Amino acid sequence: MATPDNIPSLMIPMWGEPLLVPNTAVAEVIGFVDPEGDADGAYLGTIYWRGLHVPVVNLEAEMPAVDALSRSARIAIFNTVSGNKKFPFVAVLVNGIPRLSHITEADLHYASDEPEELLPGFQARVMLGQEVARIVELKALEKMVA
């Protein structure tokens, strides 16, 4: 159970460093579905999920070409935070099934003492124990498909 000091979070496997997000940010993780439409940069197209067309984005340069994805590839459906009725969800290509972690402020530390240049869609690189993870900037995900 969540307490003010304990945030249920998901560590989501990627091809590079895993993503760290609050549990409530993710609506569902589904098996890989080939996105339809014209891919453009990080935008991979859309999938049909629960009666909605959901845009799919790629957050990683390390990700293999879509046709070379492994069987572990999944799509994480993220809830948007801006109340955008056109895009209430944004999907992210991920490399496996997330694991639940209960995080406290004391568990997290910046991965570097120096300011880091982050790829679009990320807020910070952190250390969680011995593992480096990237915190997703949810508003930036929405901007990638707007």
Image: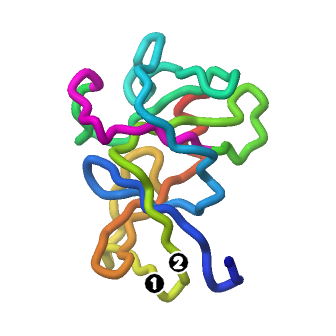
Magenta includes 29?
Answer: no
Residue shown at the point (65%, 36%) measured from the top left: 89
Image spot of residue 140 (x, y percent): 55, 44
Secondary structure of the residue carrying tag 2 is: strand
C-alpha separation, residue under disc 1 versus residue under disc 2: 6 Å
> In the image, what residue type sits under mark 1?
Asp
Residue shown at the point (47%, 46%) measured from the top left: 121
Image spot of residue 134 (x, y percent): 40, 60
Front-most of 35 and 42? 35
What residue sits right under mark 1 in the picture?
107
Q: Quadrant of residue 71?
A: top left
Image spot of residue 3 (x, y percent): 70, 83
Q: Quadrant of residue 74?
A: top left
| Part of the protein shown in magenta | 66-78
Residue shown at the point (64%, 85%) measured from the top left: 5
Residue shown at the point (39%, 71%) measured from the top left: 126
Residue 32 numbered tag: none
What residue sits right under mark 2 in the picture?
103
Q: Is 121 situated left or right of 125 in this image?
A: right
Q: Is 103 situated left or right of 84 in this image?
A: left
Q: Quadrant of residue 70?
A: top left
Location of residue 112 with respect to 70 vertically, above or below: below
Residue sitting farthest toward the bottom: 106
